[in-house]
Amino acid sequence: MNLRGKAYIAGIHEHPTRKAEGITLAQIHAESAVGALADAGLTMADVDGYFCAGDAPGLGPLSMIEYMGLNNLTHVDSTDTGGSSYVIHVGHALEAIALGKCSVALITLAGRPRAEGMATGTAPRVYAADAPDVGFEAVYGPTVVNMYAMAAMRHRHQYGTTAEQLAWVKVAASHHAQHNEHAMLRKVVTVEDVVNSPMISDPLHRLDCCVISDGGGAIVVVSPEVAKSLGDRAVKILGHGEAVKHLNAGTIDITYTGGAISGPRAYEEAGVLPGDIKYASIYDSFTITVVETIEDLGFCPRGEGGAFVSDGNLIAGQGKLPFNTDGGGLCNNHPGNRGGLTKVLEAVRQVRGEAHPAVQVANCDLALAHGTGGSIATRMGSSTVILGRADA
Amino acid sequence: MSAAKTYMDPPINDESRAYWDGANDGKLLLKRCGDCGKTHFYPRVVCPHCQSSATEWYEASGDGTVYSYSVMRRSEIPFVIAYVTLAEGVTMMTNIVDCDPDAVAIDQAVKVTFKDSEGGQSIPMFTPA
Ligand SMILES: [Zn+2]
C-alpha cells in the first residue's frame, strides 16, 4: 500500500534548553508539544493520536497523556527503537492517519542526560538485563562509542576510510552550527582539530562524537484535510521506510546500517531517487554513522562514503549534499541521546524555507531525514522519511 | 601492569548456563542445530536459522581471526573490545587480552583463553595465536 502524501507535517518545535537544570522530563515533553501545536495552529484538544518512545517517563505513553491533558485520543504508539524511534513514529503516524485511526498525531521527545550527569558514550549501558544477548556482550565492556569505533575500524579495513575523511563530517556540521544560536558547539573546526582531539576509542576521536545534551522536541502530523485547513506551510510526507538490522546469528557485517533497507523502501514509496534529494538530515551520533548511512542511502557507491563526505561536500552552499544544517547531533543537540526527532525538524525547516538563511538550500522541494537507533555494531532500528512541499 | 582489569559477572539464565559452566571447564561451547545443522551465535535454544528447538552444544576449536576491534582509551585501564570470527564460522564479541593493545589488527589469528569475572565466573576471551 503506497501512502505517498496521505499525511503532512503541520507543526514542529525544538525545545531551546541544552541543560535542563530545574526542568523535568515531563515538562520538556509538554512544552515541546505546546510549541509544535502552536506552530501548526492547533491545540491539545485537536490531538487524537499520541506517539512517544522510551524517553517518556511512565509506562509507555500513559503518564504523558495524563500530564498533557490529552482526552480525545483514538490512537497511541510507543514504539521504541532508540534514537530512530521518532522517524519511525512519523511513518506510523502516516499509516494511522491513512487508515483513518487519527487525524492529528503528536510525537514528543525529551531527555536530560547532562543534568543527570550521565557518561552517555563511554560508560557501559545495559538497556534490559534480561535481554537474551546481554550475557554474551556486557562482560566485554561494550559502550556506545567503542561499538561505533569497531564499525569505523572495519570500514577503514575494507574501504580505506581515513580519519581525515571521517573528520570532514564534523567539519561540515560545525560550519552549519555557527549559525544556530542554540547549538552547543558553534566554533568552526578543521580536519586537523578533529584528528588531533583526544582518542576516545580507536579510530574515533572526541570530535568524531556527538554532543551530550538535554532538550527535546515535538512534531505534529496531520491528515491532508487538516493540513489544507491550516494554510500552505504543511510539509508533505512522501515516503517512509523502517528496518531492524542485527547480528544475524553471528554472521555479521558492520560496514553498513539498516539504512540500506529502510532507504530504498522510502524512495520507492516516494517515487524518487537519491539524486533527487536536495537536503538530507542524517543521524550523526558519530562521524562513521554518517559515512555508512550516506552509502546505504545511495548517495554514493558502497565504500566511497569517505571520499564523498570530504572537501566540504556536505556543507550547504558548497557541497553536493547539504546535511544537518542545524549543526546536527555533532554540534547542535542530541536530546536524551536520541537524535531522530531533531533530524525531522531540520528537514521540515528546509522544505519550508525556514532554515537559517546562511544554510537554507535553494528551492528545497525534496528532503530526507534518517534515524539510527541502538548500536551500529550490534542491533539497530533504522528509519527514513522523505518530505516535500505540499505541491510535490 | 599495576592494577588488573576486572570483569563483571555475566547474567546467566537457563538458556546460557551450560555455556558458562563450559567456560568454567575451560571450554568454549557453541550451539548447532540438530535439524538444519547450522551453528549460531549467541547460543540459544531456538535455532534462529530454522526455529527448531533441537539445538545441541559442542566444543569450538577455540581458533579465530579478528573481524574488528577498538582500543577503548576512556577507561581506567584501556582494553581491546573485538569481534572474533571463529573457525566454526560465527562471529562473537570478546576482548583481546594478554598482548599489546596497539599490536592488535584485523585478520590477526587469535585463540581462546579465559579470564575470571569479579565473582569467579570464567569468561571466554582471545589472545594472539
Ligand atoms: Zn536450525
Image (cartoon, coloured by chain):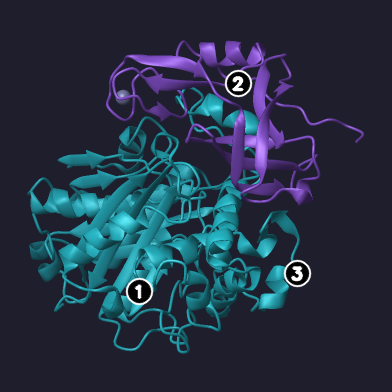
Chain colours: A cyan, B purple
Seen at 58% across and 59% down, the residue is A157
The residue that label 2 is drawn on is B10
Disc 1, ligand 1: is the CB inside 8 Å?
A: no
Label total for image: 3
Measured from the top left, where is residue A310 in percent x and y?
A: 54, 79
Q: Amino acid at mark 3?
A: Asn
Residue A141 - label: none
Seen at 44% across and 21% down, the residue is B31
Q: Quadrant of residue B85?
A: top right
Q: Which chain contains the residue that carries disc 1?
A: A
Whole-number angstrom distance, CA of label 3 to CA of label 2: 37 Å
* B67 or A382: nearer the viewer: B67
Confirm whether residue B18 shows in the render: yes
Q: Quick check: do tags 2 and 1 share a chain?
A: no
Residue A349 - label: 1
Q: Is B127 placed left or right of A148 in the picture?
A: right
Whole-number angstrom distance, CA of label 3 to CA of label 1: 34 Å
Q: Quick check: do tags 3 and 2 share a chain?
A: no
The residue that label 3 is drawn on is A196
Q: Amino acid at mark 2?
A: Pro
Q: Amino acid at mark 1?
A: Arg
Q: Is A341 placed left or right of A21 in the picture?
A: left
Give the number of the mark in front: 3 or 1.
3
